[in-house]
Image (tube, rainbow, N blue to C red):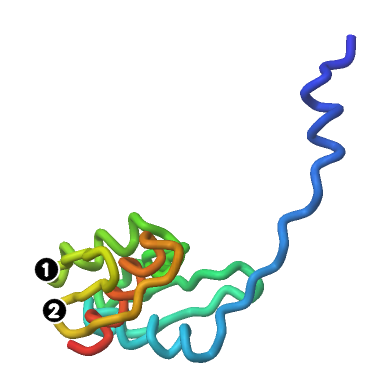
Amino acid sequence: MRNEIYDELDELPAALRVDIPAADLALLERAARAIGAVRVEVIDGEGYVNLHFDDGSVLHSWNPLVFSGDALDLAVDLGLRIEPLKNTVSGRACSAIATRDARADVRHAITQAAAEL
């Protein structure tokens, strides 16, 4: 007896490979250092990095520009105060022009504020 779910899974397209633009990678590296990372490992084609710390711990699949949970953790870890407003997004150390995606604006503001610390 075949399972229709497995038949559908065979037809799903492969996930697109996503590289991190150089400007975003520089921002991520500075934000990572603000939370104590000593090495940033880029995972090619995945759109995220792994963070390595002095104590040997590793934070996998990190990208606060894409993942809201990472952005929130970053803001909490650094004690950032984030104030999303209707036409702008401002963090403790930055301000960004709002786009159509308010969540992306807040993630960017958090990451930029962390990078500036």
Residue 84: quarter of image: bottom left
Name the secondary structure under disc 1.
Answer: loop
- For the point 42% across and 71% down, the residue is 99
Q: Quadrant of residue 72?
A: bottom left
Q: Residue furthest right?
A: 1
Which mark is first along the chain, 2 or 1?
1
Name the image quarter holding the N terminus: top right
In the rendered structure, the answer to whether residue 56 lies left or right of residue 42 reads left
Would you say 56 lies left or right of 81 here? right
- Amino acid at dot 1: Arg
Q: Do the residues labelled 1 and 2 touch (CB within 8 Å)?
A: yes
Residue 81: which numbered mark, if any? 1
> Image point 48% across, 90% down: which residue?
23
Point out residue 74 in the picture as x, y percentages from the top left corner.
25, 67
Q: What element carries label 2?
A: loop
Give 110 or 2, whichever is nearer the viewer: 110
Q: Identify the amino acid type marked 2.
A: Arg
Q: Along the line of sight, which residue is nearer the eye, 31 or 85? A: 85
Relative placement, left or right, of 46 versus 57 is right
| Residue hosting label 2 | 92
Q: In this view, does 72 lie above or below 32?
A: above
Give me the disc on residue 94. none
